[in-house]
Image: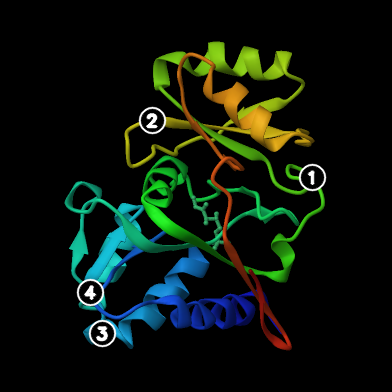
């Protein structure tokens, strides 16, 4: 079974957590695109959605789903998003699509974070297969990169990418993360870093893995 088919299985299974008359938090990426399509099939049962990226916002609108801003809501029942890597403690690396900052903001509003992934995203150690994205204020790019080298990583500027917030992305290669909560805090303390792609302090509550045998749910 191909990766997209597994993403669709996970996305479809996430619908069971959507409560009627609620506003749903929606992340970003190709797995979330599958979820947005599935959400369209029950659009009359929900109030609308809050999107973590401009791309997701456009797709939600195309499905006829009303889009609210984060400032319109005080809390969300659920937030549904994908991940680039997820470990057995439901901690993640995110930001492959450069939407990490808005994803962290919308996730922080939600009572439950539901992570939808295919089997390729499961890892023992975060950072072992995917570079860690960091959103950086453009004027601080070089000095942040030097700090990241001092921490043992190999940062690379993601050429041609500007985030929805007008910032740039540094991807840290060769950076296995043994203590995700501590590293998330440490990276956020570097001047010029807006957000890093470690989602450990606020990890997922429910993981739905799309597999060739159906959706595997870890609660
Ligand atoms: C975007 C993200 C995505 O959730 C992550 O990159 C996974 O993407 P995909 O569902 O396309 O595999 O964090 O910033």
Q: Earlier in the sequence, mark 3 or mark 4?
A: 3
Mark 4 C-beta to ligand 1 under 8 Å: no
Question: In the shown orientation, is residue 8 left or right of residue 19?
Answer: right
Disc number lying in front (2 or 3): 3
Instruction: Please determine whether, in this image, residue 53 is positioned above or below residue 77.
Output: above
Disc number lying in front (2 or 4): 4
Query: Which of the two residues, 111 or 70, is positioned nearer the viewer here?
Result: 111
Q: Which residue is mark 4?
A: 65
Mark yes or no: residue 28 visible.
no
Q: Earlier in the sequence, mark 1 or mark 4?
A: 4
Disc number lying in front (3 or 1): 3
Q: Which residue is mark 2?
A: 167
Question: In the shown orientation, is residue 168 left or right of residue 182?
Answer: left
Q: Which residue is mark 1?
A: 128
Q: Quadrant of residue 178?
A: top right
Q: Quadrant of residue 39?
A: bottom left
Query: Which of the two residues, 104 or 113, is positioned nearer the viewer here?
Result: 113
Q: For the residues marked 3 and 4, what is the alpha-carbon distance in whole angstroms?
A: 10 Å
Q: For the residues marked 2 and 3, what is the alpha-carbon distance in whole angstroms?
A: 36 Å
Q: Are marks 1 and 4 in contact (CB under 8 Å)?
A: no
Q: Earlier in the sequence, mark 1 or mark 2?
A: 1
């Amino acid at each position: 079974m191909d990766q997209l088919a597994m993403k669709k299985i996970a996305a479809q299974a996430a619908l069971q957590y959507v409560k009627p008359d609620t506003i749903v938090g929606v992340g970003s990426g190709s797995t979330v695109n599958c979820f947005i399509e599935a959400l369209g099939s029950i659009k009359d049962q929900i109030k609308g959605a809050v999107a973590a990226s401009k791309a997701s916002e456009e797709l939600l609108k195309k499905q006829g789903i009303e889009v609210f801003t984060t400032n319109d809501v005080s809390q969300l029942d659920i937030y549904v998003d994908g991940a680039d890597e997820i470990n057995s403690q439901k901690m993640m690396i995110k930001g492959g699509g450069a939407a990490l900052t808005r994803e962290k903001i919308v996730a922080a509003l939600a009572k439950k974070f539901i992570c939808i992934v295919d089997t390729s995203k499961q890892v023992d150690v975060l950072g072992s297969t995917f570079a860690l994205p960091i959103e950086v204020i453009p004027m601080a790019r070089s000095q942040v990169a030097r700090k990241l080298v001092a921490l043992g990583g190999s940062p690379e500027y993601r050429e041609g990418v500007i985030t929805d917030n007008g910032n740039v992305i540094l991807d840290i290669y060769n950076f296995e993360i043994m203590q995700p909560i501590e590293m998330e805090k440490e990276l956020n303390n570097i001047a010029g870093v807006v957000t890093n792609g470690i989602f450990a302090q606020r990890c997922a509550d429910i993981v739905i893995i799309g597999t060739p045998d159906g959706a595997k749910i870890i609660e």
